Image (tube, rainbow, N blue to C red):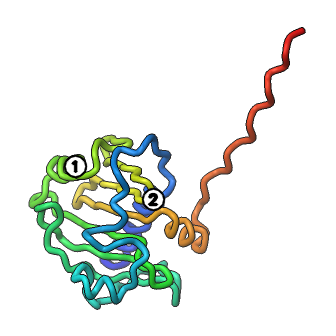
Amino acid sequence: MKSKRRGLYIFGAAIFALFVAGAAEAAADPGGFQGLPWARSADACIQAGVCSAKVLAVENALPGKEKFLAGRKAEFQGLPVRDSSLGFHEDRFYFASVFFNPQQAPYERILDALTKQHGAPTSAGARGAFWQLGNTRVLLYKGQHFYGLNYVYAPEMAKVAKAKGYPQPAAAPPPAAPAKKKK
């Protein structure tokens, strides 16, 4: 049950991160997570010490195309991590989740660390904060029993979302007709 709930949290937050409208970029695109660049293989993640070889069961993973590995880092930005996972689509890294215990890592400290690293959030509210950093989207979620942090490589996440039939953003409305000139 815990892994099922975890999978739901991972993808719920990822979808939110994928479709939240963003403003101007606050900082440079980090290009990956904890030193692992986007689109690297699962083997490269293991060799870099970011992932373990433990494959996590995620209920709605795309069979044969998507897998999740347990993370190996015990801390993030100096804050203790409860657990973490990294996602790979067609053996390309595209998604990272970090979970914090609120008693060990207060939300304000996580938010402060992310703000120092990435600048002010693109948007923020009572339930979390969001950064749009080029092709990387970062979502900090403030739950009742845990705090979650997702880093998403947007181009690959769009492919996964489409393959899973997730709601796609509405197409931009057609441009307005030019104003008629007065004679």
Kind of element beneath mark 1:
helix
Kind of element beneath mark 2:
loop
Rendered image quadrant of residue 151: bottom left
In the rendered image, which residue does mark 1 sit on? 111
Label 2 neighbourhood size at 10 Å, few (<14), some (14-19), many (20+)? some
Rendered image quadrant of residue 12: bottom left
Question: Which badge, 2 or 1, is on the more N-terminal residue?
Answer: 1
Residue 127 shows in this picture: yes
Marker disc for residue 135: 2
Name the residue at 74% across, 37% down: 175
**Residue 143 pos. (x, y %):** 27, 55
Label 1 neighbourhood size at 10 Å, few (<14), some (14-19), many (20+)? some
The extreme right residue here reads 183
Is 124 placed left or right of 22 in the picture? left
Name the residue at 16% across, 61% down: 77
Name the residue at 45% across, 59% down: 135
- Establish if 179 lies above or below 40: above
Name the residue at 32% across, 44% down: 121
Q: Nearer the viewer, residue 1 or 78?
A: 78
Give yes or no for contact between labels 2 and 1 (Cβ–Cβ under 8 Å): no
Q: Nearer the viewer, residue 39 or 128?
A: 39
The extreme top residue here reads 183
